[in-house]
Amino acid sequence: MALLEVKNLEVTFGLRQGAVVALRDVSFTVERGERVGIVGESGAGKSVAAFSILNLISRPGKITGGEILFEGNNLATLSDKKMREIRGDRIAMIFQDPMMTLNPVLTLGQQMIECLKAHRKISSSDARAIAIAKLRQVQIPSPETRIDQYPHELSGGMRQRIIIAIALLLDPVLIVADEPTTALDVTIQAEIMELLLDLCESNNVGLILITHDLGVVSQVTQKAIVMYAGRIIEQGPTKEVINDAQHPYTQGLINALPQQTVPGKRLNQIPGSMPGLQNIPAGCSFNPRCEFVMDECLTRLPEFTRSGGCTVACHMVRAMKQSADAEAQIETNAIQINATER
Amino acid sequence: MNAQQPLLQVANLEKRFNISGDFLDQLKFEGGRIVRKQEHVHAINGVSFEVMKGEALCVVGESGCGKSTVARTVMGLLKPSGGSIHYAGERIDQLSDRDLLPYRKKMQMIFQNPYASLNPRMTITQTLEEPVRFHNPGLSQIDIQDRIKAVMFDVGIDPAWGVRYPHEFSGGQRQRISIARALTLEPEFIVADEPISALDVSIQAQVLNLMMKAQEEHNLTYLFITHDLSVVEHFGTRVAVMYLGTVCELATTKTLFSSPKHPYTQALLSAIPRLQDDRPSHIRLQGEVPTPVNLPSGCVFHGRCPHANERCKQQVPELIVQSDGSQVACHGIEEGRL
């Protein structure tokens, strides 16, 4: 059984102008020790997806449909008390901005020990020992002295390491990381990503990595999920999604990267921009920007089609798959007929 | 101006920011006596480069390396603490605001954050008209309108949208408007400070394409500040890599990406996440970037450099021209041990 199974998740924000559906029909699974990347542009709903897994959607947002199954519980309907036991203990979260997530008036040790004591019956000295061990795991030099320092005494990269250490404190089985390196420089980003990857591998921890950087997804994850305007439009094994993208949006996103073009030549741009959630067009939400748009795309929401290892929500991909399947069917029929005739 | 003369020439540029506060803040009690102490952030320490006409010189580096300060100093938004800036042969860093006016018309700037660089209380038309009217007092209203309509059309903003306010546009559209504002004066030189960092990938491509198109059509020269090396590889003619307020390598884009020489450049290039990668692969640097308040002695990179020796700790390296035309500031390269 999958470690985490999200089924038809729907999140709605009740605004003064009316309800806005931020997530629609989102389904995916994370296996134990599997690393899943969620990519998309800002406003695509990737952070909402991450937050809803921890049931951290606050008003006016609300989970209005679907299930989040984790270790026999449906997190979407779990009581606050039960949810608090899971959060930080079984599922940990790493937030985007390392400057904002640590409490500036508490030392690192106080914050780490507080977290341990909230979930376990443990003495302060034992908790401190665990905290120091975790700091060592994330390669903080001289953790015995660092633990009594305040967050402002550390650089951005160090702070993100501390946050990873806090996420690992209670040995969770799943870590949700929301753009963990966006606020950091490239050299620091590479270090943090390598650390996160090593720790997930050695502790067999599942990882959901939210990012807009396809390069990072390619480096770290095994499965990639591409989101657009609140829906998943393509998901599958990372290598397949990156090397053989099916959905026109995924293709466009990959081709728009400067490294995909000959230097000095024009980049392959996707025209237009992503619609706001209040005015998502009818049919496929990507249709105003899609170069392969067909009549069907303007009226009917595309359902998910399996194509190779990937699941794609695109009418064109489905049509191509159907004609390919039909041809294959005719061929197998012909072989069968030949066989019976003989 | 002859063809060989660079459009912009920056020599030994220095910029220090005094962070010691007012007089009473500067007084410290030390060894039984009260002494006055001043502290400075050494943002730029002796940066020299030239920008030739028609090229795009990219300045890359991590946050805090002084690349934005270089951009602002070149534009005259900050007064340098030392060194000189020549524009088309004329020294401009000591000019008064009034004497700078003719240069402001030729040099324009595009800022990083399109949400902050447009006045929220002015319509797009007002924003675009203001600089034209200010710099060309003789121009009639109809001429001004014609000119901004042409520019808006160029950058892909419908001139009919001119009555709208910035909040009605998306980030990509706002950045197009910022570019339009820079182009209305028909400048020859544009300083772009991280113009695409605040935008999404698919929008970044649109804005970069627009800037390349403008460069071809108006024969523009760019000083392009960015931290994104994959953009540099695509966009730049030449690249200057900065570390802690100094240029450590300056080369043509092709040379820099095919054979990076300075150890810092090598580490920086190896850290770009590539689509083909299976794992994060990069050259590990020890430690962290030192603070620009107390600069390390010698080569500013020596504390993190795997190849540093005694000389690196004491003597500041100079930019030295290599056989392939690139300039590298590294004792190891000079001595031939790297």
Image: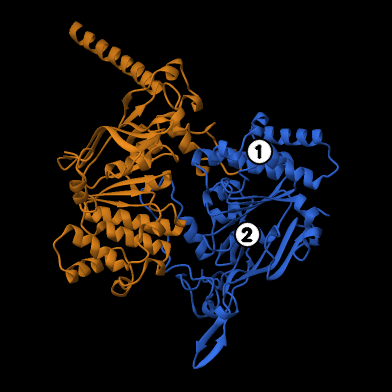
Chain colours: A orange, B blue
Q: Nearer the viewer, residue A230 or B290?
A: A230
x and y percentages locating residue A179 in the rendered image: 39, 49
Horizontally, is B236 left or right of A339 in the view?
right
Q: Earlier in the sequence, mark 1 or mark 2?
A: 1
Compared to residue A163, the image places residue B117 above or below, namely: above
Look at 72% across and 38% down and name the residue there: B217
Name the mark on residue B124. 1
The answer to whether any part of residue A230 appears in the image is yes
Instruction: Determine whether A285 is above or below B61 in the image.
Output: above
Chain under numbered label 2: B
Which residue is disc 2 drawn over? B324
Q: Residue at x 40, y 54 (%)?
A: A97
Please state the chain letter of the residue tagged with numbered disc 1 in the rendered image.
Answer: B
Q: Residue furthest front?
A: A16
Residue ID at (28%, 60%): A166
Residue at image x 15%, y 60%? A120
Which label was assigned to residue A301? none
> Please, which residue is most extreme toward the right here?
B138
Which secondary structure, mark 1?
helix
Circle 2: residue type: Asp
Relative to the observer, which residue lies in front, A5 or A51?
A51
The answer to whether the residue labelled 1 contacts the one labelled 2, judged by CB atoms less than 8 Å apart, is no
When asked about the image quadrant of residue A235, the answer is: top left
